[in-house]
Amino acid sequence: MEKEFMKGCEAVAEAAVRAGCRFFAGYPITPQNQVPEYLAHRLPEVGGVFIQGESEVASINMVYGASYGGTRSLISSSSCGMSLMSETIGWAISAEMPIVLFNFQRGGPGIGDIGPSQQDYFQATKAHANGGGRMLVYSPASLQEAVDIVYESFEIAESYRSPVYILMDGITGGMMESVELPEMRPEDYIAEKKAAIKKEWGLGGKQGRIGRTIMGGDFSGIPLQTLNQKLEKKYLKMEENETRCELYLTEDAEWIVTAYGIGARFAKAAVNRLRADGIKAGLVRPISLYPFPFEAYDALDYTKVKGVVSAEMSIPPQFITDVKLAVKERAPICIYNTSGGVILDSIEIEKMVREMAGKEA
Amino acid sequence: MEKTIIFTGIGGQGVKLAGEILCYAAVHENLNTTNYALYGREKRGGMSDCYVAISDETITEPVFSLADYVVAFTTETPASPAGKLRENSVLFMSTPNDVTAEDYNAKHFVKFDAAALAVEVGNPKGENMVILGVLVGYTDILPADVVEQTIFKKLGARHPEFNELNKKAFDKGLEVGRSYK
């Protein structure tokens, strides 16, 4: 299929439409405004519904409702906008709604700024809402990977009955790159999926059966503990089956650079230059952030690995917490992190590895 | 072979548009390309940088602190373009001011006044087209006719009446760029 040179926001929005997304509600916030801008004209073209809500809170609740009706539903926002939606995201986890969420991270905490960042790592992977609920979190490093993940995410969300959270950033949303878009899912396929959800657990009119009640969880005589045990089983299944990670030149690597999302592009550039200079560097790039691919770090040969550089666009660093848990003190770790719209610089990553290796450029 | 370009100016000068046109021209030539614009909150007057990479191989970094070509739309950028130069980078500087290569520690320096040149060809709004022309004329990074056709395609789709004016501005830039070779 022919490649198209597209802006990140538009590419992932189109991928969602092709995956069968037929409902979007959202409220404007930089750097993801091209998502609603694109879907405002694109969704009606395919018989879908686009709503600009009066707020983030209203929008996520509309998406929650549409999801209950079996419609593949999407919400997109950025950092502080995601915070406003936290309560309903918690409800969606509890009620097992297959919603797809985009977060194009900007600076924080609070209002932050509009520059790119990776400061929502904890929020996305550890606790987006009260009650300790989890959801699948993926972080793509290129527009092609973002498109592919978005396309799959609606299927994954439905198979687990769980929200799927795609953690991107201001660069991914704003940059332009060539992508190959997937095929549009046929209307009858989308209708079939919707009908199945309505039949199994969604709302679609009583149709002769006993009526259903919309609740944050199934508390009809069942203790909350039972629900949480059920959810926990689902999280364990995710941890067993859904980890994704790219290992790049790690087999003989003495120096590991680890980074996620767009940050990994800068890490890879540093690895390439180090390799060209004879320094055995490699990259570990988690693609799924929850579940975190701990086993990828276990697979490294620590008889060879002399040090790890962990890079992220967050001050204080957050991703490092999982990296430390994964490396388990088998190698020293150095942190390179930026914030406030300051983008990671591959030159600095390279310099840090060289310093650890005691080899100047 | 990968070439990296940073267009740097202030919001409203058409920095991002110049970068995008170059990318679309690269796509036409079946090359890989990335484009990312970093700008401030202001609609006009704030910082505005556009990062472009063009390569026949996979592009790893869409943003970089140093580039092969740094194209400054003004001397008034919040950060000096000097900090974006490698040893062999070329600095393109559009300004009416009396600045020199030494001011920026630039080994290769192409100075011109795009605003004045745009006025000269009767297209005062075509400053960024002049700048694009200088870059293409000096570097031959992409065929000039392909870039020109891309300008027509992207800017002339809704307003074909501007094609002639944009051509004049771009051609003037090409002439200046080639004269520096």
Image (cartoon, coloured by chain):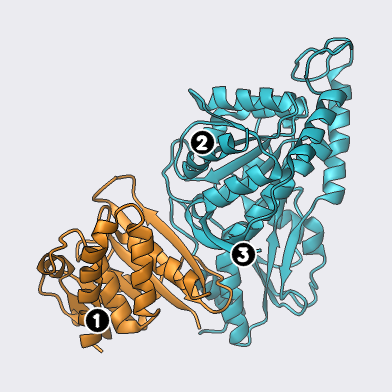
Chain colours: A cyan, B orange
Instruction: Please give the residue where the numbered disc 1 appears in the rendered image.
Output: B177
In the rendered view, tell whether residue A247 sits above or below residue A193: below
Kind of residue indicated by mark 1? Gly
Q: CA distance from mark 3 to mark 1?
A: 34 Å
Q: Is residue B142 visible?
A: yes
Q: CA distance from mark 2 to mark 3?
A: 25 Å
**Which label lies toward us, 3 or 1?**
3
Kind of residue indicated by mark 2? Ala
Specify the label residue A40 is tagged with. Answer: 2
Under tag 2, what secondary structure? Answer: helix
Under tag 1, what secondary structure? Answer: helix
Kind of residue indicated by mark 3? Glu
Q: Are marks 2 and 3 on the same chain?
A: yes
Q: Is residue A336 visible?
A: no
Q: Are marks 3 and 1 on the same chain?
A: no
Instruction: Please give the residue where the numbered disc 3 appears in the rendered image.
Output: A2
Q: Position of residue A7 (x, y in %)?
A: 50, 54
Q: Is residue B12 left or right of residue B122?
A: right
The residue at the point 52 percent across, 57 percent down is A6
